[in-house]
Structure formats: C-alpha cells, structure tokens
Amino acid sequence: MPPATTAKPPKPKSVRKRPGKALANAAAAKAAAKRRKRDGLTPQEVEAIFFRFHQVDPEPKGELESVNAYTLLVAVALSAQATDVGVNKATRPLFKVADTPAKMLALGEEGLIGHIRTIGLYRNKAKNVIALSQRLIDAYGGEVPADREALETLPGVGRKTANVVLNIAFGVPTIAVDTHLFRVANRTGLAPGKTPLAVELGLEKVVPDPYRLHAHHWLILHGRYVCKAAKPLCQRCIIRDICRFEDKTAA
Ligand code: SF4
C-alpha cells in the first residue's frame, strides 16, 4: 500500500478577470492626467500658452469703452456684476456730458442715475461715482492717481478695479482677476488658487515678462468666449493640448 501523502493539491490557476486593454489604457491615461495636474504646468508650457495667445491677438483690448483714465475708472466701477455691453450702452451718452470728475459732480447723483439706471446696483454705484469724483478733486487735483494704494482709497474701488486702471490707463503690467480669468487660471493649471488674490499672485510668479502687460486681457477674453463656465469650447481651444482641465468637452 503506498504511503499516505501530506502534499497539498496544486492551487487552481487564478480565475480573476484582468481588465480589458481599453480599460487599462483609460486608467493609465487618467493617472497620467492626474500626475500632470498635480505637477502643474512647466515653464515651457506657460510660455507656449502666451505665445499662442500673442500670435492670435497681439494687442488685446478690454471691451469697456472709455475716453480717458477717469472714464475708464468710472466704467470699471459700474461694471461690477454687469456686462460690458450693458455698461457701454449707458456710458456712451454719459461720457459725452461727464468725462471729468468736475463734470460728473455738476451732473449730480440724480442726473447720473438717469444715465445708469439700466445697470444693476445703480443707486449704490451712482453714490460711489459721485463720492470718488469728489475725492479725486479734493485729494488728487481732479486726476486719477497712477498708484494702487491711492486708487484703493477711492469709494467703490477695490483691487480688481485698481488693477484694470493701472494696466489700461497707465501701462502697468498688473493682472486683474475677474470671474473669467479665475476660472481659466484654475482649469488650465496656470495658477490654481482658491481666491482671486491667490490666482493673481500665482500668475505674477509664472507669466513671462514679455507677456505680462496683456496677460489679463488674453485670459479674460479666453474665458469669456472659449473657456466658458457652463460648457467650455475645448474642441476649438488653442491651448487644449496643454490645459490640465480633466473634464474637457469632446473634440
Ligand atoms: S481646453 Fe477647455 S477647459 Fe482647457 S482652457 Fe481650453 S476651453 Fe478651457
């Protein structure tokens, strides 16, 4: 009689299913995208983004209409939570009669309201425009100061408005972060940040000097017309291959 054996029977081959190739590729692509997002954009990629913006639109312009630094300041102050088109409609006739602080004061708050009542929050904005006009006359000889701190002391003028005025009226390479720019900076990975200030400071660190002056215009226009909030037009985006946004719309 053969001796009893203690050897265990061989294990059956694993029957665990391996994921299909397509599934594995998708997972690998997702992991690579995550890695790329975590690592942020390289300086070469940032340079490429602005090079492309520059090639398409070398001299981008803001869409708010103005005739001097003062009217620019007023237009930006009126544009909070309003469209540029709506503001322009109201300010075209307004600036024909009031393009200086003195003329605005002569028009008075009620006269100003008559021009801007189609713009949201017009009562509060009218108060601010009259008050800032008075302060420009009292403290700055009726001129708009080319200085951030001074601008931010004006009623209704915050960091974003000051940045727009410094950039457009005085050629200072500031970056004014509005809702469009905030979105683009976060989606692309250019300067992720939880607040407008964090995004502004992040962009200041990465935008190459030659592109600084126009950076905010390019990014705002890109956000307004291509990288839209609800449905970005990724299929026609010129920086699609660099952008880190994980939910790009189909090509
Ligand atoms: S690829 Fe899409 S999400 Fe990225 S910047 Fe372009 S439009 Fe925006």
Image (cartoon, rainbow, N blue to C red):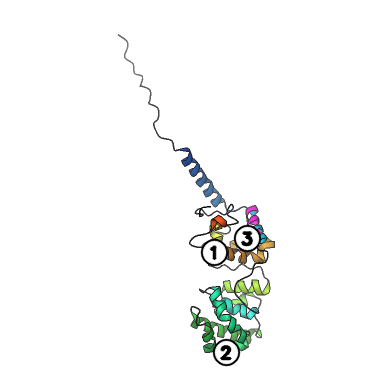
Side of 14 relative to 86 (left or right):
left
Secondary structure mainly formed by the magenta segment:
helix
Q: Residues within 10 Å of mark 2 (few under 14, many from 20)?
A: some
Q: Tell me: 194 left or right of 15.
A: right
Mark 1 or 3: the one toward you: 1
Instruction: Quickly name the residue at label 2.
Output: 107
Query: Nearer the N terminus, badge 2 or badge 3?
Result: 2
Residue 208: x %, y % from top left: 67, 60
Q: Is residue 216 magenta?
A: no
From the viewer's perspective, is residue 163 above or below residue 248? Answer: below
Q: Is residue 48 at all visible to an observer of this figure?
A: yes
Count neighbours of disc 3 (C-alpha within 10 A) and say few if under 14, some if 14 to 19, many if 20 or more. few
In percent of width and height, residue 72 lies at 62, 77
Task: Look at label 3 and name its amino acid.
Answer: Lys
- Image: magenta residue range: 44-50
Q: Are marks 1 and 3 in contact (CB under 8 Å)?
A: no
Label 2 and label 3: CA atoms lie apart by 44 Å
Pointer 3 residue? 205
Are the residues flagged by discs 2 and 1 in contact, CB closer than 8 Å? no
Q: Which residue is mark 1?
A: 182
Q: Mark 1 packing: few (<14 Cα in 10 Å), some, or many (20+)?
A: many
Q: Does 25 sit left or right of 5 as displayed?
A: right
Q: Position of residue 124 (x, y in %)?
A: 50, 82
Q: Nearer the viewer, residue 192 or 76?
A: 76
